Amino acid sequence: MTAELRFKRVLLKVSGEALMGDQGFGIDVAVADRIAGDIAAVRRLGVDISVVIGGGNIFRGVAVASKGGDRVTGDHMGMLATVINALALRTSLMKLGVDTVVLSAIAMPEICESFSQRVALAHAEAGRVVIFAGGTGNPFFTTDSAAALRAAEMGADALFKGTQVDGIYSEDPKINPNAERYDQLTHDDVLRQGLAIMDVAAIALARENRIPIVVFSIHHQGEFARILTGGGRATIVSD
């Protein structure tokens, strides 16, 4: 079955907002369970998978800065929010019998293991799903940048970005229903056109490491596996 796979090792970026479901804040356990189910299905295909999760459903550091607060402190608070989400997703995966580990860029040994490339690769080789929390461990960097960085460190064949829509559009299709949808772009296309699917640092890092970015809807159950086996609907950013 692995011969049919488009990619063998992938990193999935999930926004914190994806975990909210229809709630205005926090974690909808049913949504976390559904996303975990999609990850479990991909793991059963024989794909090595790691995950970077955001924290926007709980806290955003830029929100502090926008109100005159300290951005560094705000970003540290946002990193802690990603740890909460990572633990929730691990719980959902463990309920499905998927061996999962959380590695944090900020040391908190009573809660989870600390990140290092060596440890992360060892867990992946042991067949575990690896969830990266704490962003990069540094303020001023988004979890998109963390996703591109971890994808490079893990030697990922592709970076999957789960979003609210089924690919990259010229404009927000929820605002402009006539927005153009793209099936294929290059990293330079995304940067040149200012398509805000990920921040500039993340796109540039993926380009430098020749990592394709696959943008798809995280809300379409089973889409992750369909794309990996040659179907589904997504925009692929690749040079």
Image (tube, rainbow, N blue to C red):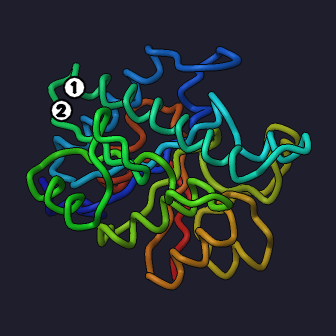
Q: Are marks 2 and 1 in contact (CB under 8 Å)?
A: yes
Relative height, residue 57 to residue 191 (above, below): above
Q: How many marks?
A: 2
The image position of residue 165, as x and y in percent, is: 64, 42
Relative height, residue 120 to residue 41 (above, below): below
Residue 39 left/right relative to 205: left
* Mark 2: secondary structure: loop
Identify which residue, 94 or 7, lies in the foreground. 94
Q: Work out how far the residue at label 2 is from the one at label 1, CA to CA, in angstroms.
A: 5 Å
Relative height, residue 16 to residue 199 (above, below): above
Badge 1 is on which residue? 94
Q: Residue at x 26, y 62 (%)?
A: 9
Residue 91 left/right relative to 136: left
The image position of residue 113, as x and y in percent, is: 27, 45
Furthest residue in direction left, as rendered: 126
* Mark 1: secondary structure: helix
The image position of residue 125, as x and y in percent, is: 11, 58
The image position of residue 79, as x and y in percent, is: 55, 44
Q: Amino acid at mark 1?
A: Met
Q: Residue at x 72, y 76 (%)?
A: 191
Residue 209 left/right relative to 192: left
Q: Residue at x 28, y 51 (%)?
A: 49
| Dot 2 crowding, Cα within 10 Å, few <14, some 14–19, many 20+ | many
Residue 226 left/right relative to 60: left
Q: Which mark is residue 24?
A: none
Badge 2 is on which residue? 98
Q: Amino acid at mark 2?
A: Val
